[in-house]
Image (tube, rainbow, N blue to C red):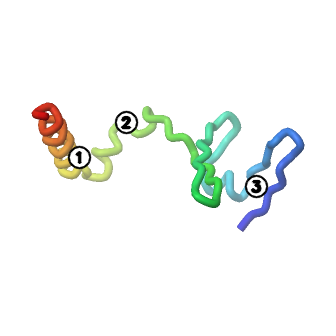
Amino acid sequence: MEIVTLSSKGQIVIPSKVRKKFSLKEGDSLVIVEEKDAIRLQPLVNLSELWGVDKLKDTRPMLNDMRKEWDDDLEDKAAL
């Protein structure tokens, strides 16, 4: 666990060890996720970096199933 200190301007420094582990570099964006009793920083994923990821991990059948579920759900909502 790393400990950081909040500056008078509300800034923190992410320790080098953590930046390296998550491949964070200058200019990267992070999302602040407010949880019940916690604050979580999460790297913002650039969607262009995910291009073709379904082909790399053989997830096409799973994605096709998800698309079918979404289509079925939309059809059900349209019927109302």
Q: Which class describes the residues within 10 Å of circle 1: few (<14), some (14-19), or many (20+)?
A: few
Disc assigned to residue 71: none
Q: Residue furthest front?
A: 80
- From the top left corner, tell me how far across and down residue 76 is, in percent: 13, 39
Residue at 58% x, 48% y is: 33
Q: Residue furthest bottom?
A: 1
- Contact check, label 1 and label 2, Cβ < 8 Å: no
- Contact check, label 3 and label 2, Cβ < 8 Å: no
Does residue 78 appear left or right of residue 55 in this picture? left
Mark 3 vs 1, N-terminal side: 3
Marks 3 and 2, how far apart in space? 30 Å
Which element is circle 3 on? Answer: loop
Residue type at the position of mark 1: Leu
Q: Quadrant of residue 55?
A: top left
Residue at 79% x, 49% y is: 13
Q: Which residue is mark 2?
A: 51
Q: Which class describes the residues within 10 Å of circle 3: few (<14), some (14-19), or many (20+)?
A: few
Against 28, residue 3 (above or below) is below
Q: Which class describes the residues within 10 Å of circle 2: few (<14), some (14-19), or many (20+)?
A: few
Does residue 36 appear left or right of residue 67 in this picture? right
